[in-house]
Image: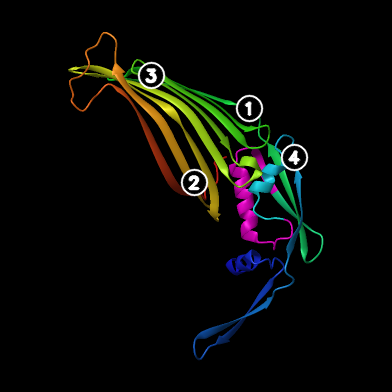
Amino acid sequence: MDLLRDKYGDKGYIHAHLEPDLEFDRQAGEVKILLQIEEGSLAKVGKIKIEGNTFTKERVFKHTFVLKEGDILNAHKLREGWRRLYNLGFFETVEIEPLFTSSSTVDLLVKVKEAEQRGQILFGAGYSSVSGLEGHIQLSKDNLGGVGKKINLDWKFGKRRSDYDIGYTDRWWRDSPLRLECDLYNLLRKYYEAEGAYQKERVGGRIGLGWPIWKNMTTSIRLRNEEVTISHIEGEPFPKDPELEAGSKIERSLELMLDRNTRVRDE
C-alpha cells in the first residue's frame, strides 16, 4: 500500500486515499482484494520560499532544486531536490516543509542551516625507496561569494617531483545549467635510470563543460592542451634509449564523459 501511495504521490495526487476491502472465499481458498481509490485533486507547487540562507544566494536554489513554481507536486522530484541541495555541502541541514494553501496548491518552505564558510587546507606526506620523501599541500575554497563557485590549489613536491595545479569551477556558468571547469598545471618528474637520468615537464591546461541530460545523468566534454619537454638533469648523463629524445612537443586531447550520480553525502 505504501508503494502504491508513493506512486500516486509521484504523479501529484498527494491527497489520494486508498482503502482495501477483502472478500474471503473459503470454498475456493481465495481472497479477493478490492481496492477503493479516491485520487483527490491534483496538487501543484505554489510559491517556493527559502529560509536560513544567510550567505548562499537564491540562484543556487533555483539551479539545484528540481521542482519549479507551477509544476505538479511530484514526490520523487521533491526528494531529489532535497538530495541535490544537501549534496552541495553548503548546508549542515536541509528541510522541506509543505504548506497547504488549498487542496490543489502547496507552497514549499525550504529551510537550511548554512555550513561554516571556510576554506580547506590539507597536508600529506609519504616516503618510498624510489621517490624518497614527498609532500602534498592542497588549498580549496567552495561556494565563493555564495554562488557555488570553487577554487583550489594543489602542490606536490619531493626530490623527484614538483607539481602545481590551480583549478576553478563554476557550477552554473553565466547563470545557465552549464558547468565550467578549468585548470592550469606544471608537472615535473625526474627519472634516474642505470644508464643516466632525465626530467619530463608537462605545462598546460584543461577546460571542460558539463550539462545535465536526464535525471541524475550528466555529460561533459574536456579539452587538454600541454607542452611536454624532456631534458637533461645537470651533472647526469642522458640515457641512450633510442626512443627517448630531448626536446619539446605539443600534446592535445578531447574527452567525452558520462556520469551518473545518485549518492547522498555522509553526515
The kind of residue tagged 1 is Arg
Q: Residue furthest right?
A: 101
Tag 4 or tag 3, which sits nearer the N-term? Answer: 4
The kind of residue tagged 2 is Ser
Residue 189 position (above or below residue 6): above
Q: Which residues are magenta?
A: 69-95
Residue at the spot 33% in from the left edge and 18% down from the top edge: 160
Tag 3 or tag 2, which sits nearer the N-term? Answer: 3
In this figure, which residue is indicated by the disc labeled 3?
Answer: 134
Magenta stretch encompasses residue 91: yes
Q: Which of the 4 image quarters holds residue 232?
A: top left
* Callouts 3 and 4 close, C-beta under 8 Å: no
Residue 129 in view (yes/no): no
Q: CA distance from mark 3 to mark 4?
A: 43 Å
In this figure, which residue is indicated by the disc labeled 4?
Answer: 52
Q: Which of the 4 image quarters holds residue 163?
A: top left
The quadrant of the image that shows the N terminus is bottom right
The kind of residue tagged 3 is Glu
